[in-house]
Image (cartoon, helix red, strand yellow):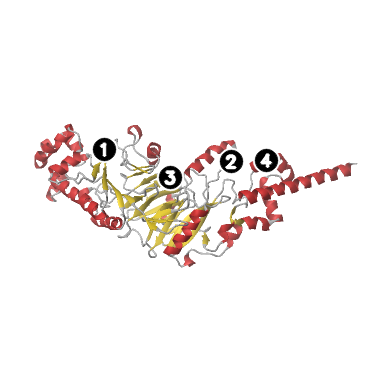
């Protein structure tokens, strides 16, 4: 009697096992991912039922892999198989790489991958996929799978640290796809060993000074993903992270161009719903022909008489080849002649001896600089973003310091009337210096907003929340998506993009290690953005 009962129970367990396996395969075939407990509830299979038969969902995955690996191979790329393929970045024979992330267990964005493939064919590039840990620690449990499309040899998977040249590498450190700030704790690697790209479905960028080597900085960055967001969690305490991960997920990539063994260029891309993206003013689409589109350019802080004219010409030449709708300029005026930071007689005498103490001359040189940029880029509209250095003139006049400044006294009296009138103080200064302001110049004030798509472009980034010192976290809370300046060091934190400077990299007051970069931003009418860097007089090899 006991034997019959045992046989009956064993038979029931085997039938239950077969039914669970059948449902498992149906879910895989339909969802194109490994099932979770929640998927079985619609089939009247509880979590406890799976645990009684298999010991848990992880054991179920292993059982399917051991008993019917061909079924999984039909629907997925096995992480073990892909990782063992002998493919090398250095052996690819390419100098342009489109680097993106694939999250284990997630579906691909077919339109984006198709567009990347088209882009690489047109520009002789190589698609590089960096795998990221899934939400279930699938690498450790050896259940990581990827869409079968990645079996195509045109995709180069990178799992070991792979150098692209002497100064940039793809890093094998596994970062969780749900980590809120994936570059946390990694900056000290770049400061010693060069720039790194880390796998993550978010876009981040941080620069790290290279000791006292002025102008040579290392960067750490994450590219965004080519897989769709899928961060569902059955664990209640993980639902918050899942929601945040879904919100921050960016379908995008980093384009890296290798110039030689030491020099490289890079920029970000993001994609539209259909998978199209824009790079350097050209729109690439999965179905349509590549075409030029209009751009909007946000230049790094200019700083007038202390501008790096050579760097400005590099960007102006690039933008002159594009259809520039709007040009945004930050810190156009340096205030070198009337700076409140100059407190010693020796420094005043030094500036006077160099012919840099005359306010009118500084205003004229600043106007000519902006005018030349405007004409060269053929920008339809020029927006002068109210910035802290531009307000040096306001402060000089309000403090009445011109009273003890004979050289600039008369001119200051004429400009000071603007403090009691409607209008911009700096614009009044240009007029007093004998310059006529073009009709397409727009002087933004502190409370003005200037939006492109859903991106705020009218803030300099020097004012934080409720008077606090600004930070990327604070500015993200205030504006969400924005492009700012002020810090002189380019950065990306999710929707916050920060340009660098177009001033001289040695301004006297930035002694010691410096992370300043000469970086501008291209923003397109759909809100996609790219940071473009000046590296030895070049922005790109294309």
- The label nearer to you, 1 versus 4, is 4
Instruction: Count the numbered circles shown.
Output: 4
Measuring 15% from the left and 48% from the top, which residue is drawn there? 364
**Whole-number angstrom distance, CA of label 1 to CA of label 4:** 58 Å
Q: Earlier in the sequence, mark 4 or mark 3?
A: 4
Q: CA distance from mark 2 to mark 3?
A: 23 Å
Q: CA distance from mark 4 to mark 2?
A: 17 Å
Q: Earlier in the sequence, mark 1 or mark 2?
A: 2
The picture places residue 534, in percent across and down from the top left corner, at 32, 56
Depth check, mark 4 against mark 3: the one in front is 4
Is 345 rendered above or below residue 467? below
Residue under numbered circle 4: 42
Which residue position is annotated with label 3? 494
Residue 233: mark: 2
Using the numbered discs, state the Cα–Cα distance from disc 3 to disc 1 in whole angstroms. 26 Å
Q: Position of residue 471 (x, y in %)?
A: 37, 40
Q: Secondary structure at mark 1?
A: loop
Q: Circle 3: is it few (<14), some (14-19), or many (20+) Cα within 10 Å? A: many
For image coordinates 23% across by 42% down, the residue present is 390
């Amino acid at each position: 009697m006991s034997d019959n009962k045992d046989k009956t129970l064993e038979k029931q367990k085997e039938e239950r096992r077969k039914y669970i396996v059948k449902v498992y395969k149906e879910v895989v075939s339909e969802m194109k991912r490994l099932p979770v407990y929640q998927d079985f509830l619609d089939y009247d299979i509880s979590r406890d039922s799976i645990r009684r038969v298999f010991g848990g969902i992880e054991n179920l995955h292993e059982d399917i892999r051991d008993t019917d690996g061909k079924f999984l191979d039909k629907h997925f790329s096995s992480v073990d198989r892909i990782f063992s393929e002998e493919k090398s970045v250095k052996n690819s024979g390419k100098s342009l790489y489109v680097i993106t992330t694939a999250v284990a267990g997630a579906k691909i964005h077919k339109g984006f991958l198709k567009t990347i493939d088209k882009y690489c064919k047109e520009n002789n590039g190589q698609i590089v996929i960096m795998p990221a840990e899934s939400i279930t620690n699938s690498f450790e449990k050896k259940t990581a799978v990827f869409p079968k499309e990645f079996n195509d040899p045109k995709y180069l998977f990178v799992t070991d640290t792979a150098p692209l040249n002497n100064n940039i590498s793809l890093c094998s450190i596994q970062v969780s796809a749900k980590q809120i700030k994936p570059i946390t704790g990694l900056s000290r690697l770049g400061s010693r060993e060069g720039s790194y790209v880390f796998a993550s479905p978010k876009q981040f960028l941080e620069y790290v000074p290279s000791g006292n080597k002025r102008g040579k900085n290392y960067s750490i960055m994450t590219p965004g993903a080519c897989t769709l967001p899928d961060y569902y969690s059955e664990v209640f305490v993980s639902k918050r992270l899942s929601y945040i991960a879904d919100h921050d997920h960016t379908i995008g990539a980093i384009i890296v161009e290798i110039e030689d063994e030491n020099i490289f260029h890079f920029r970000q891309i993001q994609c539209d719903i259909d998978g199209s993206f824009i790079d350097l003013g050209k729109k690439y689409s999965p179905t349509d022909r590549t075409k030029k589109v209009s751009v909007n350019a946000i230049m790094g802080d200019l700083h007038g008489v202390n501008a790096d004219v050579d760097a400005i010409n590099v960007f102006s030449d690039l933008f002159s080849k594009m259809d520039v709708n709007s040009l945004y300029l930050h810190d156009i005026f340096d205030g070198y002649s009337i700076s409140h930071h100059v407190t010693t007689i020796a420094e005043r005498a030094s500036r006077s001896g160099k012919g840099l103490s005359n306010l009118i001359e500084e205003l004229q040189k600043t106007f000519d600089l902006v005018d030349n940029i405007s004409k060269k880029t053929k920008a339809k509209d020029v927006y002068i973003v109210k910035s802290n250095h531009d307000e040096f003139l306001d402060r000089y006049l309000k403090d009445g310091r011109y009273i003890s400044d004979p050289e600039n006294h008369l001119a200051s009296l004429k400009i000071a009337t603007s403090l009691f009138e409607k209008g911009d103080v700096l614009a009044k200064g240009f007029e007093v210096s004998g310059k006529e302001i073009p009709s397409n110049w727009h002087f933004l004030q502190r409370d003005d907003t200037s939006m492109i798509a859903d991106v705020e472009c009218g803030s300099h980034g020097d004012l934080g929340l409720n008077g606090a010192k600004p930070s990327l976290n604070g500015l993200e809370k205030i504006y969400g998506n924005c492009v700012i300046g002020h810090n002189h060091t380019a950065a990306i934190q999710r929707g916050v993009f920060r340009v660098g400077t177009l001033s001289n990299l040695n301004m006297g007051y930035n002694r010691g290690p410096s992370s300043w970069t000469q970086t501008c931003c291209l923003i397109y009418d759909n809100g996609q953005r790219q940071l473009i860097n000046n590296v030895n007089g070049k922005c790109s090899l294309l």
